[in-house]
Image (cartoon, helix red, strand yellow):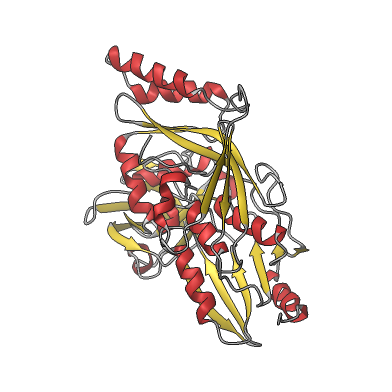
Amino acid sequence: MPGLPARCPRPRDLRRGAVLTWVFLVAVGAAASTGCWDRTGAAATAGSAAVLPSVRTSAPAPQASRPAGTADREAVARAAAEAVAEGKSGKKAAQEVVSRSGDRWGAVYDQGEYAAFAEDLDGRWTGVGLWAGRGRGGRVEVERVQPGGPAARAGLRAGDRLLSVDGHAVTGLAVADVVALLRGAAGTPAVLCLSRDGADFTETLRREQLRAEPVTVRELPGGITVIKVASFTRGSGERVRAAVRAAPAGARLMLDLRGNPGGLVTEAVTAASAFLDGGLVATYDVRGTQRALYAARGGDTTRPLVALVDSGTMSAAELLTGALQDRGRAVAVGTRTFGKGSVQMPTRLPDGSVAELTVGTYRTPGGRSLDGAGITPDVPADEGAEERARTVLGGLGVGP
């Protein structure tokens, strides 16, 4: 279906609501807060024409069967069509089929939710500028706030407990359902009831159009350039390439992918092109059809490189890490990554809603499946991971 490329979204419990979330931190907060979905196919246009990955396709295996734990696309569409004909909700009927199928990553979105994807993937969104997550006892808490955003200006901070939004209690809600409450038109008020140190308080914020920089760069003592990639939104891959080109001569590189929930696959492949001189980045299958993604030529293959990862490193970020690790280009330091390596592709339903159904899985250049397994770092490190990475970089020799 033209215009609806594949994605690798986040876990179900984190992604229900208005465009379901990004880390699912609250989409109201940052680019990654409402739509880190891995896309391939038509989404290839998201990258720079000069560095778009090469995609090669092989014929499907004869009588290729639908992967286990996935929903039948025809059954979903049929259920939606029958519901619409009876004057019922096509989205609801489709979601029931998806839920019964055991497709862990399958979901159905209405037109408004799906339309918001484009905004999210551009690294912009409308909200109050905070990320929400599940805290102790299952309560909804502020994980962090967008610098300069409405929440930050009001003095909200990480650890604040969120009790209600516009009078709607959030206790027991999935994080992404909280996102649905927090999102809205720019300029509209959002009344938040919170608790801090046992004291309840209320803040009325105005929703705004917000943007976040997915790639930031800083220099550490000892000639180390840290390139932090928060998410793979449009343009992030080329920003990584630019950061590598701009790094001082002789600088060692630290690619920080911790907490990166993924995003556009093509952007992750473009980022891989910053460190590789062509070659395989990943393979994936779509209903039995095998495909491969290749880096562009001309990347920096000589600077010592460490990739920092943790349990929040997901999807496209895992794909990139696996490629650099298997190709012998980077040493991975940190903790085991999340393990999201399946492929989702959308199907437009009769009522205009969109069903995203799992169709296959990704594999690293070495043939490793990411789904459920994640990436095991070469050097385990939890607390003090950055310092450990600096030590590793100090022991890596500079290429010719």
Percent of width and height locating residue 364: 67, 50
Residue occupying the point 59% across, 67% down: 256
Tell me if 250 is positioned left or right of 358 in this view: right
Residue occupying the point 71% across, 47% down: 368
* Residue 6 visible in the current orientation: yes
Quadrant containing the C terminus is: bottom right
As drawn, 388 above or below 105: below
Q: In which quarter of the image is residue 327?
A: bottom right
Residue occupying the point 61% across, 21% down: 63
The foreground one among 180 and 12 is 12
The foreground one among 143 and 222 is 222
Quadrant containing the N terminus is: top left
Residue occupying the point 55% across, 23% down: 101
Tell me if 9 is positioned left or right of 400 in this view: left
Tell me if 251 is positioned left or right of 379 in this view: left
Percent of width and height locating residue 308: 65, 66
